[in-house]
Amino acid sequence: MTIYENKYRITYEAFSKFSAKLSKANDKAELLEIVQKHLKYFFNFKYFRVLLKDEVFLKSFHVFHNSNNSPEFILNEFFSYEEDLLKNHIPIQHSSNGEFLNNYDQKLNLNNGKLWAWYFKYQDLQLCVSLISDDEKPFIVRDIEILNLLIDSFVTKYQQIKLKNRLHQKNVNLKNAINVIEEQKFQISKIVYNQKNTIEQRTKKLKDQNSKLAEISRLNAHNVREPLSRILGLLEIAELYEEKDLKKEIFEKIKTSAKDLDHILQDIIYKSNNAIEKLSSKTPPTK
Amino acid sequence: MMPDKIKIFLVDDQKIANFITQKLLQTSNIDCEVLAFDQPIQALDAVEKDLPNFIFLDLNMPKLNGWQFLEQMQKNITSKVIILTSSSDPADVEKAKDFPQVISYQTKPPSREILQELILG
């Protein structure tokens, strides 16, 4: 067994452990932490960096070989070689003293440093993966194979988490929408209930008014009929009288009854007018 | 033996109404004695004393209406009552059936034929 074969056996074992951990990652922070912890078992590096560009964001994270700080995504930070790489997609391999990292505290102490960088594309996601190695931590061409595997797994998990987050957000939105609908449903049922009550009250009021009016009209009919029945009766018996007695016995009584009838009718007309005025004053005035 | 004259009471607050009924009775070939009351309370007292055969009773009267009159005379009086009213309200016709002494419900003015039929049978 050559030294390379032995190395790769160990590397693939490390990768299978990495895959197992990765499958349990719940969010992006956990994902980056797992990458950081396992990276050193895959290949040698002094500095490792991934820049991601999707339809909305440009973000990156990096790992210093001598730092245990948890990696975090940094928004809108990129280096000039990454800009070139995003444009022309040509892998980079040249000597570097890592001066573009001078803003960071970690010292790389490079001994014949070398910058490697590759361009990856997955559907709507572009990546620039780069690393700095040196003679102390040499990266070799054969390591690219495991690096490809690493990036594949990383991207798969990254997209999965992104989808999960989106789904979660959609669920939250949906729940909010359902709450709004429930609230509106409640409001509507309240309105319907109130309207039902109002209608019932108005119906009852109308029924009461109707029965009152019916009672009034019944009384009116009766009151009118009383003197009228007298007049009819007097006419009936009028034929029994001599002409000379008619005036005294019958006509006077007809006159009295007719006057009674007239009074009753005038009273009814007066009351009806009042009732009509009352009803029409309740409706709002029209302009 | 001559039978007693048929005694008839008219109870109506309208004098003219009593006048008409009285005239119709007198010209109906009914041998009867007619007493007219325009005060129902007085009629009620007289009923107890004179025990008329028939009472023509109006319903719509002040102080004591026809129904109250019937309730107060109900106990021991055998007089037959004919309700004579200007109202043809079905509710009143129904209510009249609650009083066993009421033999008929007539609306004004009464016809001579019906009077004969009611009194002579």
Image (spheres, rainbow, N blue to C red):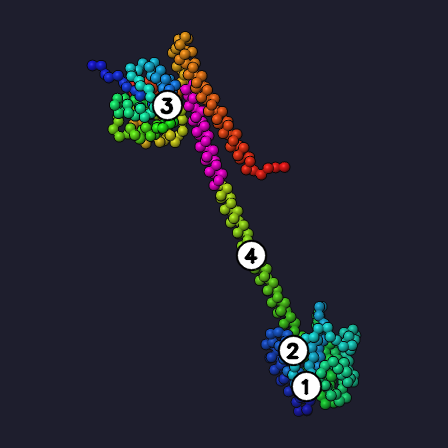
Write down the residue under mark 4: A183
Q: Nearer the viewer, residue B80 or A14?
A: B80
Q: Is there any visible trace of residue A121 in the rendered image? A: no
- Label 2 element class: helix
Which percent across, then down, holds residue A121? 72, 73
Q: Quadrant of residue A211?
A: top left
Dot 4: chain letter: A
Dot 2: chain letter: A
* Mark 2 or mark 4: whose residue is earlier in sequence: 2
- Tell me if residue A113 comes above or below residue A205 in the rendering: below
- Label 3 element class: loop
The three-letter code of the residue at mark 2 reads: Leu
Q: Are marks 3 and 1 in contact (CB under 8 Å)?
A: no
Q: Are marks 2 and 4 in contact (CB under 8 Å)?
A: no
The image's mark for residue B13 is 3
Write down the residue under mark 2: A32
- Label 4 element class: helix
Reply yes or no: does residue A217 show up in magenta: yes
- Label 1 element class: loop
Q: CA distance from mark 2 to mark 4?
A: 42 Å
